[in-house]
Image (tube, helix red, strand yellow):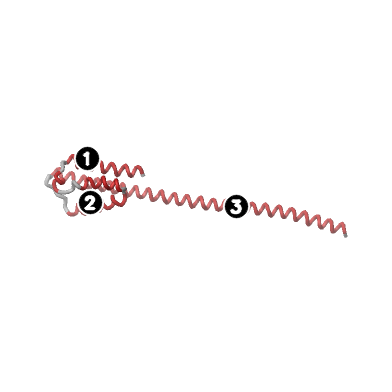
Amino acid sequence: MAVFELVAIAVVAGLSAYLGTYLREKGRNLATKEDVDKITRATEEIKAQISSQQWVKQRRRELQLDVVKDLNKLLAEFLIASIADPEFGPDPDFYVRLAATTAMVKVLFSVDGFGTFKEVEVFIGPRMGGRPVHEFVERRDAAIRALVDEIVAG
């Protein structure tokens, strides 16, 4: 019986050592898998945030470009009418469209960009506020350029 007990103890000890090592290795593998899963989830969340931020920036640029196009069209309309008739004064609809565009410039652009745009506004009125056409064109071009530069700079 002593030999049987020794063999049984040896077998149990061997199995215990094997199972202990096996379970320890399985535990490490499980912990590693969980760590990889956490890192993968964190990476995906960061990618999603970056993608969302990129979309917001891109959408803002699209809106800014739309406003610059509307502004350019509005100012060209005013310039053409003023050249055709030096006594031209914009109608109320023009002022409504100008106010809407002004609001969008104020919301979408920096204070400096808005300030450059406001320098053009002083020309809007009968006889361009008594100022020469070339000054209007220079200020208009400077304002459009400043706004486009701001869009490009991002």
Q: Amino acid at mark 1?
A: Glu
Q: Which badge, 2 or 3, is on the more N-terminal residue?
A: 3
Instruction: State the CA–CA distance, disc 1 to disc 2.
Output: 19 Å
- As drawn, the residue found furthest toward the bottom would be 1
Q: Amino acid at mark 3?
A: Lys
The residue located at (21%, 44%) in the rendering is: 76
Q: Image quadrant for the C terminus?
A: top left
The residue carrying mark 3 is 33
Q: Which badge, 3 or 1, is on the more N-terminal residue?
A: 3
Residue 72 in which image quadrant: top left
> x%, y% of residue 26?
66, 53
Instruction: State the CA–CA distance, disc 3 to disc 1.
Output: 65 Å
SS label for mark 1:
helix
The residue carrying mark 2 is 98
Q: Are marks 3 and 1 in contact (CB under 8 Å)?
A: no
Mark 3, other Cα within 10 Å: few <14 / some 14–19 / many ≥20:
few
Q: Which badge, 1 or 2, is on the more N-terminal residue?
A: 2
> x%, y% of residue 109?
31, 48
